[in-house]
Image: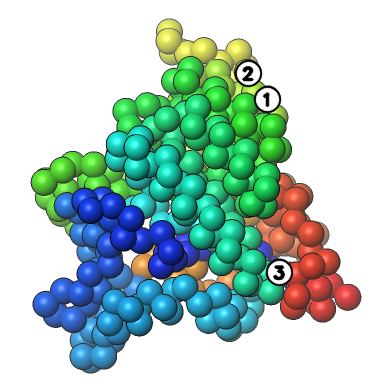
């Protein structure tokens, strides 16, 4: 069985919600359909889309959105990739932490309603991550409880840094941590393009640096700020999943641990390394030796399967191929850890039910 926890779903129902922030999909002069949020325009694209544009076969905005909004088409692509289930999330460019609360709060509610409806049409194989207006932590806590309660979503997807100026060590964020502990579900950390917050200079970020390099920086900053901020001393049951191979955490873990000991401003009560049980990472790395190194260092008990399904840098082959690993640990990464962490009932999974029989 295989469950992919990193799979974005840009669903038509939550686009075109604000005259400035959108988010919008727009047709450009070369025929390409691109995402715009405020002044910022995404310049990344999947290879198949670029090929269609080059051939003059780019879809219209309506066709583009209809393709994303069709759960059955996603299920067919999942079958082709050998995936039994996915946990889908709003693309990180559309978190809206940078927008005014009068928009970001109802927008999060809209995203979660649309995501839950989409997953309900997924033959018990689609699950969803909730979003929340983290620039307004008390409202975010309310939305986490609603989305992960009555709506049935499986945890919170969040950026790694800059929530309307707040960071994860801010005391106001305790509202969010309390809510996640109350619903007993994890937070999925996926950085976002910080350039979206730059106003009219949003497109001055050459080569999408705030995405290609910056997302992992922000994901590592999440780890650093939460540990140094003493978050896990106050909320020891809080669980955090960091994608893209864990930001830069696994590769600098020893340095982070040793440096933390020498900080005069830290608030953590234990060595940083002792908070590793609060974290999960995935293997969304493009080289087998790197995936093996993370497995050897972190261990299978704290690893998940996340491929960025459909994204521009998605790993388009099985992330567990080529690993030196026991079958027991292999199954933990492919689905068992996800089932336990997100409390997924595999008996209701359509195709997965048949495979488990």
In the displayed structure, would residue 324 be above or below residue 63?
above
**Marks 3 and 1, how far apart in space?**
32 Å
Residue drawn where x is 71% and y is 69% of the image: 124
Q: How is the image coloured?
A: rainbow
Task: List x then y, in percent, for residue 322.
Answer: 61, 69
State left or right for residue 227 relative to residue 17: right
Task: List x then y, in percent, for residue 353.
Answer: 81, 73
Q: Is residue 67 visible?
A: yes
**Residue closer to the observer: 286 or 3:** 3
Quadrant holding the C terminus: bottom right
Q: Which residue is mark 3?
A: 124
Of the two numbered discs 2 and 3 in the rendering, the one whose residue sits closer to the viewer: 3
Q: Which mark is drawn over residue 236?
A: 1
**Residue closer to the observer: 218 or 60:** 60
Q: Are dots 1 and 2 in contact, CB under 8 Å?
A: yes
Badge 2 element = helix
**Marks 2 and 3, how far apart in space?**
36 Å
Q: Are dots 3 and 1 in contact, CB under 8 Å?
A: no
In the displayed structure, would residue 13 be above or below residue 205?
below
Number of callouts: 3
Residue drawn where x is 21% and y is 51% of the image: 20
Find the residue positioned furthest to the top.
Answer: 264
Asked which quadrant contains residue 91, the reply is bottom left
N-terminal label among 3 and 1: 3
Task: List x then y, in percent, for residue 346.
Answer: 79, 64
Badge 1 element = loop
Residue drawn where x is 29% and y is 76% of the image: 61
**Marks 1 and 2, how far apart in space?**
6 Å
State left or right for residue 200 relative to residue 4: left
**Residue closer to the observer: 35 or 143:** 143
Q: Which residue is mark 2?
A: 233
N-terminal label among 2 and 3: 3
């Amino acid at each position: 069985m295989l469950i992919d926890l990193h799979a974005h779903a840009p669903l038509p129902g939550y686009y075109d919600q604000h005259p400035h922030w959108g988010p919008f999909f727009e047709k450009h002069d070369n025929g390409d359909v691109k995402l715009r949020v405020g002044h910022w325009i995404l310049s990344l694209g999947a290879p198949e889309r670029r090929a269609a544009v080059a051939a003059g076969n780019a879809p219209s905005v309506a066709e583009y959105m209809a393709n994303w909004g069709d759960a059955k088409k996603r299920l067919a692509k999942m079958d082709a990739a050998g995936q039994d289930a996915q946990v889908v999330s709003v693309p990180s460019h559309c978190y809206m932490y940078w927008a005014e609360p009068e928009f970001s709060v109802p927008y999060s509610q809209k995203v979660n309603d649309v995501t839950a409806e989409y997953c309900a049409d997924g033959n018990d194989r689609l699950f969803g991550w909730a979003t929340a207006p983290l620039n307004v932590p008390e409202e975010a806590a309310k939305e986490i409880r609603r989305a992960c309660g009555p709506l049935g979503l499986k945890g919170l997807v969040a950026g790694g840094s800059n929530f309307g100026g707040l960071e994860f060590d801010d005391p106001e964020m305790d509202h969010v941590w309390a809510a996640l502990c109350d619903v007993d579900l994890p937070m999925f950390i996926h950085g976002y393009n910080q350039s979206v917050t730059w106003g009219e200079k949003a497109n001055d970020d050459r080569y999408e640096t705030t995405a290609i390099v910056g997302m992992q920086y922000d994901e590592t900053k999440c780890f650093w700020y939460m540990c140094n901020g003493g978050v896990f001393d106050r909320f020891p049951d809080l669980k955090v999943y960091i994608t893209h191979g864990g930001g830069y955490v696994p590769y600098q873990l020893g340095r982070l641990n040793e440096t933390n000991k020498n900080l005069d401003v830290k608030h953590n009560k234990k060595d940083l390394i002792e908070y590793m049980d609060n974290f999960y990472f995935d293997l969304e790395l493009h080289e087998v030796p790197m995936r093996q190194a993370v497995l050897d260092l972190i261990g299978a008990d704290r690893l998940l399967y996340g491929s960025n399904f459909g994204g521009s840098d998605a790993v388009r082959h099985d992330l567990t191929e080529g690993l030196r690993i026991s079958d027991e640990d292999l199954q933990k990464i492919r689905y068992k850890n996800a089932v336990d962490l997100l409390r997924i009932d595999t008996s209701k999974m359509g195709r997965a039910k048949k495979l488990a029989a």
